[in-house]
Amino acid sequence: MTVSGPTVSEMLAEARRRFTEAGIADPQTDARLLISGLLKLSPTEMLTAGRQSVSGEQAGSIGRAIERRLKHEPVHRILGEREFYGLPLLLSAGTLEPRPDTEILVDTIIPYLRDLAKTESNVHILDVGTGTGAICLALLNECPEASGIGSDISIDALETARSNAERNGLQDRFTTIRSNWLENIRGTFHAIVSNPPYIASKTIHDLAPEVTKFDPAAALDGGSDGLDAYKAIAKDAARFVRPNGVVGLEIGYDQRNDVTAIFEAEGFKCLKSVRDYGQNDRVLVFSPA
Ligand code: GLN
């Protein structure tokens, strides 16, 4: 007698049930993403794969992945990758998982780069604290005339960013540099972009365990008031941004006034403030005044 393994539907139902029992916020979505990711099935293939059996090996890896999710590891960390602005990106221990809100920074900066590309021969971008490379790589992918540097203090992050550049065919226009904020940076840029750590140290423990246990602390912790990274970037940014360039930043929901004041004190002017999908202030754009 041949014993066939469980079907995709049965595995989905099992994952959904266990996630629901554990109080995971969106059990249905997580079950589907996890299983489709592990089985390498597209969303459309998932719709028709319900009655297919999975192998014993696949059932084992799904089982282990369910256990990891129950310990609060986010789905995309378990899968080791996620999509950002249409690009598949590897994640690693030293990189923040890119969030959909950060795509708003990319959306906001693209028009400036396209405008600059009309008159400038090499539009040059610096992504400070690049992590997976998400922001810079998305901008390079959208602006074929641009080149960029991703800086980070984490060697692990720089390796991941380089792999992501290669994976997306952007390695010829992307380089990395190890730097604490702008300390080791040379040259000038049309756009300096960053999603720096901006959570006040004392409030980090209020975040979901998915974040506190799995995103690197160095990518979250913005010091006592959450503003350390903005102060460090603002202090030096004027030396590195071109006169016609911009500085584009992701910010915490309550940091618009503080970050604006920090950059104004260094001679910048706020050009634009953009809200996220939850109607929170999320992105600021500055220009040299
Ligand atoms: N947006 C992230 C969060 O709240 C924080 C990222 C950051 O500090 N840059 O989970």
Image (cartoon, rainbow, N blue to C red):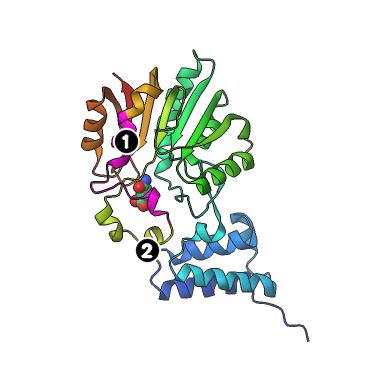
Residue 88 visible, this angle:
no
Residue at the bottom extreme?
A: 1
In the image, 258 versus 70, the foreground residue is 258
Sequence order check: which comes first, mark 2 or mark 1? 2
**Observer-nearest of 50 and 118:** 118
Residue beneath the point at 39% across and 22% down: 241
Q: Position of residue 83 (x, y in %)?
A: 53, 47
Task: Identify residue type, mark 2.
Answer: Pro
Instruction: Residue at 47%, 75% (x, y): give it.
Output: 18
Find the magenta span and give its range.
215-235
Residue hosting label 2: 209
Q: In the structure shown, which secondary structural element does the residue marked by tag 1 occupy?
A: helix
Q: Which picture quadrant has residue 105? A: top left
Q: Which residue is drawn at 47% across and 28% down?
A: 125
The residue depicted at 52 percent of the width and 53 percent of the height is 92
Look at the picture and state if 69 lies above or below 283: below
Q: Residue 164: x, y in percent? A: 58, 43
Is 141 included in the stretch rendered in magenta? no
Q: Foreground: 275 or 81?
A: 81
264 relative to 37 in the view: left or right: left
- Relative placement, left or right, of 206 versus 168 is left
Residue 225 forms part of the magenta stretch:
yes
Q: Name the residue under label 1.
A: 232
In the rendered view, would you say 206 is above or below 111? below
Q: Where is residue 282 in the image (x, y as percent from the top left)?
A: 32, 40
Find the distance from the CA under tag 2 to the CA under tag 1.
Answer: 28 Å
Question: What amino acid type should be assigned to the residue bearing mark 1?
Answer: Ala
| CB contact under 8 Å: marks 2 and 1 | no
